[in-house]
Image (tube, grey):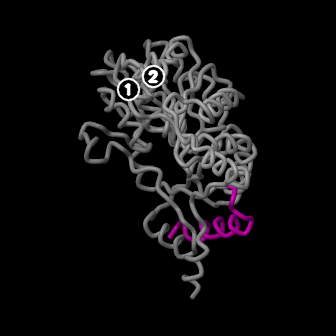
Amino acid sequence: MKNKMAMKNKIKLFDPVFGKKEEQAIIKVLKSRFWASGSGSGNVKIFEENFRKFVNAKKCVAVNNGTSALHLALSLMDIKGKEVILPSLSFVSTAHAVIYNGGIPIFADIDPKSLCIDPTSIEEKTTNKTKVILPVHFAGLPCNLDKIQKLCKKHNLRLVEDAAHAAGSTYKNKKIGAHGAACFSFHPVKNLAMPTGGAITLNDKKNVMYGNELKIRRWCGITSRKGATYDISELGWNFYMNEFAAAVGIEQLKKLDFLNKKRRNIAERYFKEIKSDYKMPMDKGCSYHFYWICVNNRKKFMRKMDEQGIETGIHYKPIHTMSMYKNKKTKLIETEKVGENVVSIATHPNLSEKNIDHIISSINKFQNI
């Protein structure tokens, strides 16, 4: 009976926060009969401008998901036959986006304290074929942008940030997305949730000029549109954001900082009260998309947590261990160690104090089994 009740009232790992405003926005779009526009007018244009201001970027281009954002951003970099350095501890889209553009993914190791890409490993992996560094702000914790930017300058490399977890995160008091080219995801589980969505923000001179180019490429390469006529000047994709997603995003953005503060408060309790030597650090700039810990027997631990009605996850199985990307020469000591032991814990603002108490006590009880 107890297990049945636990399953019924299961504490979700991810759970979007929404209210009447989002419901009203969806209904308004539905009744308008204007549901999508490849040209990015309507709510999409409003969301782009609002998000651009939120992160203090020079340009923002909204797309249909985070994978598309990475794909499009890298399409500007001319990486065919060139190497792109990225962490293996990420969702596979980070590597796929390199392949989509004809590039060669080169996996660097992580800093075991942050689980973000290690600048020392980047330096070791850099060759005369390297074109781009693609760091991931893991779980919303900003990577060491200062050191990475210095490496880019030293080796004349381009920088594209995978900020799929980092909407609202800050690095040295500047929002992620204000530093260079950054790619965001607005999947339903993300801190800024949409039915589906993504964005690219651009800042430096090399990238800002490409804002209009990205808008052309996100809509099948369509240019010179006048009424019913248009031209195609280059290859593009069907990556534009729809009006429903943008309408939800406009409302979500209004409360993103407030909700991220709630996530940080939950993470602070975890950091203080979970009795583990290996857990996610506290950082006032982190958006805490989730919280991670490392345990000795992950399979058994996750099963015990499930029995307690607590959903956990794995972020991530390292990409270089998967069949498509497996290479015997790739040895990433820290990534492989963490990949065997890391467990993701909920930080979403729908958690009650009772939920948080239960999560903490259960982790402390079962983490060393």
Instruction: Kindly identify which numbered label has been placed on residue 216.
Output: 2
Query: Which amino acid type corresponds to the residue marked 2 in the rendered image?
Result: Ile
Q: The N terminus lies in which quarter of the figure?
A: bottom right
Q: Label 2, label 1: how many angstroms apart (C-alpha)?
A: 7 Å
Whether residue 164 is visible: no
Which secondary structure lies at badge 1?
A: loop
Q: Nearer the viewer, residue 7 or 84?
A: 7
Label 2–label 1 contact, CB within 8 A: yes
Query: Which amino acid type corresponds to the residue marked 1 in the rendered image?
Result: Gly
Coordinates of residue 2 in the picture (x, y in percent): 59, 85
Whether residue 92 is visible: yes
Question: Which residue is rendered at x = 61% and y = 74% of the image?
Answer: 9
Question: Which residue is rendered at x = 58% and y = 30% of the image?
Answer: 41
Q: Classify mark 1: residues with Cα within 10 Å, few (<14), some (14-19) or many (20+).
A: some
Residue where numbered disc 1 is placed:
236
Prevalent SS, magenta region: helix
Question: Which residue is rendered at x = 31% and y = 32% of the image?
Answer: 99
Q: Classify mark 2: residues with Cα within 10 Å, few (<14), some (14-19) or many (20+).
A: many
